[in-house]
């Protein structure tokens, strides 16, 4: 989208959407810095590695709370002010983590950064509302590309930067970058139109989440579809290090992190899926993603278990599948009720987040029961469940909205 040729009805220029995507990536990626640094954090703060690993759970729980309690505010408040304010608070959490003298302070900083990093989930529906309606899918795809690249790069960047300046360095750099980007957003984002806001109180907005779920069958089916597909892929995310650290691979954590960067291909594809959604093909983009999701499991099980090249191919296919479904889901959900986009996103992303946690648990349980083969079987079963949900969603397109 050329900033000099912004479509009529759009207030979203190319530099603005790029900056919003960078902001989303910084916010989301910050929750993953601790994962490759747990041993370093434990040693520096004089605690056991298991204690340092609690920070992973703290970040997840805090993020989940932010999805439920903060993202709905996007329908009530000026989203420019809300997103920038949340991002500054997340920066404060990163800075607190980077200057922590003890584990209690570090966990507090992790919780603050995790809860307020949902600024990214305020920016995604904001971008959709600023874009020309015919290009809202492309805007959502661009935002998700930035968010996903941020998550993928965060782990590798944390490991690399820690070798240069210690484990605290990445938190301090991230905090400073988030402040700079937040101030830049304040300068370039337009004021949120009051006509886009819902005139209800905060308590009523939270209660309305249940009402939206009851009113829109496709919110229910698309939230479930997001949960089941992310659960399937999360089974791999949770166990790939266990596979790749053993024979025949024997890779170090740093090498495994670099292999994980192959998922950037899925992030790049997110924008293309958004274009399909703009053409009214979101349902079939989802179907294509589900086909790819089924294809990846024999690749993982028969080829990826013995060859790193085939593992990377399988990982790219799985990530492409996940993003095809996810971007389609968000475009469909956002179109259900434009004035409730933030609350719709709150419902959808909470289900998505729960699916990821459930998939991680399924993956680790399957690994203990039968190794990598059991993980692939579990992933294939979850993928079949996703197909069943998609079939229900297809019927829901003909179902009337409940008053």
Image: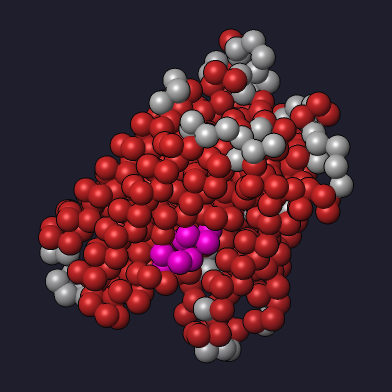
User: Where does residue 282 sit, x and y in percent of width and height?
Assistant: 43, 31
**Within the magenta stretch, is there residue 229?**
no
Left-right relation of 313 to 56? left
Residues 314 and 134: in front is 134
Q: Position of residue 30 (x, y in %)?
A: 57, 58
Q: Quadrant of residue 246?
A: bottom left
- Locate residue 7, reporting x and y percent: 60, 12
Query: What residue lies at 66% left-to-right and 75% top-to-bottom?
Result: 106
Q: Quadrant of residue 12?
A: top right
Magenta span: predominant SS is helix
Q: How is the image coloured?
A: secondary structure
Residue nearer the viewer, 368 or 186: 368
Magenta highlight range: 353-360
Relative to 149, residue 367 above or below: below
Q: Residue at x 53, y 40 (%)?
A: 218
- Answer yes or no: is residue 269 visible: no
Which residue is more in the foreground, 32 or 115? 115
Residue 168 visible in this rendered orientation of the protein = yes
Query: Going 49% across and 44% down the picture, which residue do you hit?
Result: 222
Q: Is residue 112 shown left or right of residue 280?
A: right
In the image, taking residue 252 as reference, residue 36 lies left or right, namely right
- 37, above or below 310, in the image: below
Q: How many marks?
A: 0
Residue 128: x and y in percent read: 61, 30
Q: Can you say which quadrant of the picture contains the C terminus?
A: top right
In this view of the protein, which residue sits in the foreground, 400 or 336? 400
Q: Residue at x 67, y 68 (%)?
A: 111
Q: Is residue 55 above or below residue 92?
A: below
Quarter of the view holding residue 393: top left
């Amino acid at each position: 989208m050329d900033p000099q040729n912004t479509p009529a009805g759009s207030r979203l220029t190319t530099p603005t959407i790029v900056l919003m995507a960078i902001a989303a990536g910084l916010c989301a990626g910050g929750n993953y810095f601790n994962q490759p640094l747990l041993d370093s954090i434990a040693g520096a703060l004089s605690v056991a590695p298991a204690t340092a690993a609690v920070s992973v759970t703290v970040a997840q729980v805090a993020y989940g709370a932010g999805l439920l309690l903060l993202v709905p505010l996007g329908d009530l408040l000026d989203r420019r002010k809300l997103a920038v304010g949340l991002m500054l608070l997340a920066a404060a959490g990163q800075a607190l983590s980077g200057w922590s003298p003890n584990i209690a302070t570090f966990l507090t900083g992790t919780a603050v950064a995790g809860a307020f990093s949902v600024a990214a989930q305020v920016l995604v529906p904001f971008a959709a509302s600023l874009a020309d309606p015919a290009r809202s899918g492309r805007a959502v795809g661009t935002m998700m590309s930035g968010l996903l690249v941020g998550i993928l790069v965060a782990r590798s960047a944390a490991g690399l930067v820690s070798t240069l300046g210690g484990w605290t360095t990445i938190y301090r750099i991230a905090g400073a970058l988030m402040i700079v980007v937040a101030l830049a957003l304040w300068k370039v984002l337009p004021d949120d139109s009051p006509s886009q806001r819902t005139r209800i109180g905060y308590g009523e907005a939270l209660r309305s989440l249940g009402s939206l779920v009851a009113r829109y069958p496709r919110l229910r089916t698309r939230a479930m579809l997001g949960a089941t597909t992310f659960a399937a892929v999360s089974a791999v995310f949770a166990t790939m290090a266990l596979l790749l650290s053993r024979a025949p691979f024997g890779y170090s954590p740093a090498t495994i992190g670099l292999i994980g960067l192959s998922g950037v291909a899925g992030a790049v594809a997110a924008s293309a899926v958004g274009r399909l959604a703009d053409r009214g093909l979101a349902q079939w983009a989802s179907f294509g993603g589900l086909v790819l999701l089924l294809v990846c499991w024999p690749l993982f099980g028969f080829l990826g278990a013995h060859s790193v090249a085939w593992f990377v191919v399988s990982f790219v296919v799985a990530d492409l599948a996940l993003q095809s479904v996810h971007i389609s889901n968000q475009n469909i959900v956002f179109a259900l009720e434009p004035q409730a986009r933030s609350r719709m996103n709150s419902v959808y992303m909470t289900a998505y987040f729960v699916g990821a946690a459930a998939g991680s648990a399924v993956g680790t349980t399957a690994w203990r029961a039968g190794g990598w083969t059991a993980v692939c079987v579990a992933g294939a079963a979850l993928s079949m469940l996703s197909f069943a949900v998609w079939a229900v969603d297809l019927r829901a397109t003909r179902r009337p909205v409940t008053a």
